């Protein structure tokens, strides 16, 4: 199995992925993990991979171009069965999901940072969005480590007792709305016009509506109270 990880701080993954069961999986030739520095595909010589978000607001957004370039280049060598974005508003990771992913041959994990990634990447490239719980981390690296660890130990031959894995256990109430950054038009996928209007009241209303819609669709349990 080949797992590729895109990150702006790959150093965070060096230790979690280099020891214990994951090291054993690698040494046995059962699991190959490659962490890629996203700045390799930066838009300029300064290593730029993020920009201010359209519509204003705090926090930078990871741009389309670097991530898409990385996906398309790596996908030529390792046709990905899944392109996964680690995000707080994704499907909550569980053992059943780990079992399914452990059967894949090539997986790409995208570690978000700052305010997140441009929504168009999520719409057109990501095949699965995963959350490890209802909390926010500084980036997706630790979440990626959790997912890879859960998957890796399920690969046949990784654990000494292959049957042991079969017995393992298993601020605001709205999710964030979609975010966008430059360019305004990427491959014909355009930023919603409301975010370009400069009308901050209407932008906030749109964001609230989108947040409410996303929460109702993905985590209706958050609205029970």
Image: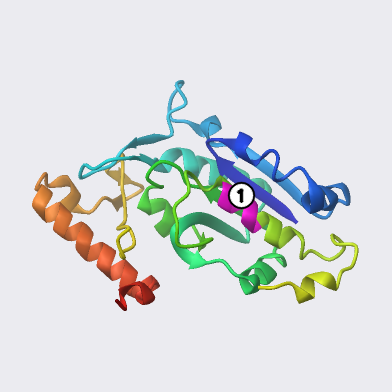
Q: Is residue 17 above or below residue 147?
A: above
Disc 1 secondary structure class: helix
For residue 143: magenta? yes
Residue with the most extreme bottom position: 224
Q: Position of residue 222 (x, y in %)?
A: 35, 72
In the picture, which quadrant includes the N terminus?
Answer: bottom right
Q: Position of residue 185 (x, y in %)?
A: 29, 45
Residue with the most extreme top position: 45
Q: Position of residue 214 (x, y in %)?
A: 32, 67
Q: How many labels does the image show?
A: 1
Q: Is residue 197 left or right of residue 25?
A: left
Q: Is residue 38 left or right of residue 189?
A: right
For residue 83: magenta? no
The residue segment tinted magenta is 142-147
Front position in the image: 160 or 151: 160
- Magenta region, main secondary structure: helix
Image quadrant where residue 124 sits: bottom left
Front position in the image: 120 or 61: 61
Q: In this view, does 198 lie above or below 150?
A: above
Q: Can residue 101 be seen in this view?
A: yes
Q: Residue at x 30, y 58 (%)?
A: 177
In the picture, which quadrant includes the C terminus?
Answer: bottom left
Image quadrant where residue 57 sits: top left
Q: Which residue is drawn at 77% across and 61% down?
A: 153
Q: Is residue 148 above or below residue 62?
A: below
Q: In this view, does 165 lie to the left or right of 83?
A: right
Q: Is residue 107 visible?
A: no
The residue indicated by pointer 1 is 75
Q: Position of residue 18 (x, y in %)?
A: 76, 42
């Amino acid at each position: 199995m080949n797992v590729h990880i895109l990150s702006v701080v790959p150093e965070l993954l060096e230790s979690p992925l280099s020891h214990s069961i994951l090291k054993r999986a690698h040494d046995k030739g059962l699991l190959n993990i490659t962490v890629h520095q996203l700045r390799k595909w930066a838009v300029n010589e300064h290593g730029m991979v993020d920009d201010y978000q359209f519509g204003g607001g705090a926090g930078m957004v990871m741009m389309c171009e670097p991530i898409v370039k990385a996906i398309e280049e790596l996908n030529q060598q390792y046709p990905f069965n899944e392109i996964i974005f680690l995000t707080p508003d994704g499907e909550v990771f569980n053992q059943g999901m780990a079992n399914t992913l452990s059967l894949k041959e090539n997986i790409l994990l995208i570690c978000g940072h700052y305010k997140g990634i441009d929504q168009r990447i999520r719409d057109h490239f990501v095949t699965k969005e995963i959350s490890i719980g209802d909390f926010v981390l500084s980036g997706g690296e630790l979440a990626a480590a959790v997912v890879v660890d859960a998957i890796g130990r399920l690969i046949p031959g990784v654990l000494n007792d292959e049957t042991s894995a079969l017995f393992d256990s298993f601020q605001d109430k709205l999710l964030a709305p979609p975010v966008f950054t430059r360019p305004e038009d990427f491959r014909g996928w355009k930023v919603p016009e409301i975010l370009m209007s400069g009308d901050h009241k209407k932008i906030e209303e749109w964001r609230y509506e989108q947040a409410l819609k996303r929460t109702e669709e993905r985590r209706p349990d958050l609205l029970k109270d």
